Amino acid sequence: MTGLTPKGIATRQRIVEGAAEVIREVGVGDTTLDDIRLRTATSKSQLFHYFPSGRDELLLAVAQFEADRVLRDQQPHLSDLTTWESWQRWKSALLRRYRGQGTTCPLAVLMSELGRTEPAAQAVTRSLLLQWRSDLADGVRAMQAKGSIRTSIDPDRFAGAIVAGIQGGVAILLATGSSADLEAVLDLLLDQLRAPGEVAHSEGSGRRLSGVRSG
C-alpha cells in the first residue's frame, strides 16, 4: 500500500472486505472478479489499480485479512491473559468463533488456492501463528509473575502446545462439525497451567506464593 492516499487505503480495504464476504458466501472457487466488483461497486480499472497482479494478489490480501480476523476475534481477552477469569473468557471467545465459523475455514481455503508452499502465503500463516503464540506466552508469563503458574513451565513452549492443540481441534471440527475435541484440548491444557506446582517466594518478604488451583 506504499504511496496510497488515506482515501486509497480505505478503498483498497473496502475491496478486500467485500471480497472476503463473497468468498465466505460462495467459496473461493466460485468467486470471480466480476462478483467482487459488483459487491464493492468497483470498476475494473479500480480493481487492477489496487491489485495490479489480479486475482491472486487480491486473494492474498483477503488471506491476510482473514488471518488478522482470527486474532481479532479473540480480543480483548487474548491481550489480557492476566487472571484465570480472563483465560476462561479467552477460551469462550475462541470456541464461539470456531463454532460460528462451522465446517468451512476461509483462511484454509484461501491458502489452498494460493498454494501453501508459496512464500507470500507461507508468510501470512507464519505471521499469524507466531503472533498467536507470542500473545499466549505473554499471558503465561504474566501469570507466572503473579505466582499463579509454576515457574517450571516454559511460556513459549506451552504457548506453542496451545496453538498446536487448537489447530488439531479445529481440523476435527472442520471434518466432523463438532467442537467437542477443541473444547477438550483447551480444558486439558488450561488444567495443566492451573495444576499445583512449585512454590515461589516473593522477594524480601519470604511470603509463599503457590500455583493453587482455583475455580
Image (tube, rainbow, N blue to C red):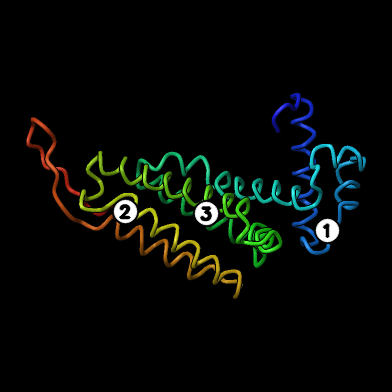
* Residue beneath the point at 11% across and 42% down: 208
Q: Which mark is residue 94?
A: 3
Left or right: where 113 falls relative to 157: right
Q: Position of residue 39 (x, y in %)?
A: 87, 47
* Residue beneath the point at 80% across and 33% down: 11
Q: Tell which circle, 3 or 2, labels the residue nearer the N-terminal end.
A: 3
Q: Position of residue 116 (x, y in %)?
A: 61, 61
Left or right: where 77 falls relative to 123: left
In the figure, 29 relative to 76: above or below?
below
- Contact between marks 1 and 2 (CB within 8 A): the answer is no
Residue 80 position by quadrant: top left
Q: CA distance from mark 3 to mark 1?
A: 28 Å
* Residue beneath the point at 49% across and 67% down: 168
Q: CA distance from mark 1 to mark 2?
A: 48 Å
Q: Tell which circle, 3 or 1, labels the residue nearer the N-terminal end.
A: 1
Label 3 Cα crowd, 10 Å radius (few <14 / some 14-19 / many 20+): many
Q: CA distance from mark 3 to mark 2?
A: 20 Å
Left or right: where 160 falls relative to 75: left
In the figure, 40 relative to 29: above or below?
above
Badge 2 element:
loop
Label 2 Cα crowd, 10 Å radius (few <14 / some 14-19 / many 20+): few
The mark lying in front, picked from 3 and 2, is: 3
Residue located beneath label 1 in the image: 31
Q: Which amino acid is tagged 2?
A: Gly
Residue located beneath label 2 in the image: 215
The mark lying in front, picked from 3 and 1, is: 1
Badge 3 element:
helix
- Contact between marks 3 and 2 (CB within 8 A): the answer is no
Q: Which amino acid is tagged 3?
A: Leu
Q: Which amino acid is tagged 1?
A: Thr
Total residue callouts:
3
Residue 40 position by quadrant: top right
